[in-house]
Image: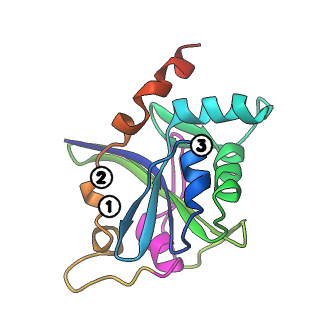
Amino acid sequence: MGHNIVALITKQKPIKEKLEFIEMPNFVEKGFYIIPLNACHSIYLEKKWGIYLEEDEEYFGGLGNIIYLKIIEKIAIEIGITDYALIGTDYFGGIGSQAAKVYKNSKQITIKNAKNYDENCLVGVDINSALRAIGVIKEHYKDEFDTINLSHYRCFEKYYEKYEKYCEE
């Protein structure tokens, strides 16, 4: 089974009404909010907010779920979070890639002593280093990823099916 997700992870409680207004689900695991992101939904938000993207805009995500950072950062501001990890996975059968970026006060920061990834559209540091940077403390016999149960979230597509038409335009 594959593992293909893009999500914001934060200790800060997002503004519920804003999440509802932009129709985004969220989950809570061990005090951390997991906010799934989706390429088709991001195109919808881009149109809704009237955001114009340049050809050379930076993007993030696994194959089939690539999202522009400008939209991701706008989502974070809209839902009231400033400190978060942006994570992405793109695995199938144990082969694939991962990456993460960390934001403090809405600005991307550098994580020291982290493994760097740069494969396809996943560019950043390893996810566990990013999760540590936002305060995830690994449990005995688990890494940070499994401590907040991210391995249980294999894909978020079902939450965004009604937005698929925006990817087809």
Across and down, in percent, residue 131 comes to 46, 72
Q: Amino acid at mark 2?
A: Tyr
Mark 3 surroundings: few (<14), some (14-19) or many (≥20) residues within 10 A: some
Which circle, 1 or 3, is nearer the viewer? 3
Q: Residue at x 51, y 75 (%)?
A: 11
Which residue occupies the foreground of this view, 118 or 138? 138
* Mark nearer the N terminus (1 vs 3): 3
Secondary structure at badge 3 equals: loop
**In the image, residue 129 above or below residue 73:** below
Quadrant including the N terminus? top left
Magenta span covers which residues?
114-135
Residue 153's label in the rendered image is: 2
Q: Say if mark 2 contacts mark 1, CB within 8 Å.
A: yes
* Mark nearer the N terminus (3 vs 2): 3
Q: CA distance from mark 2 to mark 1?
A: 5 Å
Report the number of discs: 3
Horizontal side, residue 91 vs residue 126: left or right: left
* 150 in the magenta segment: no
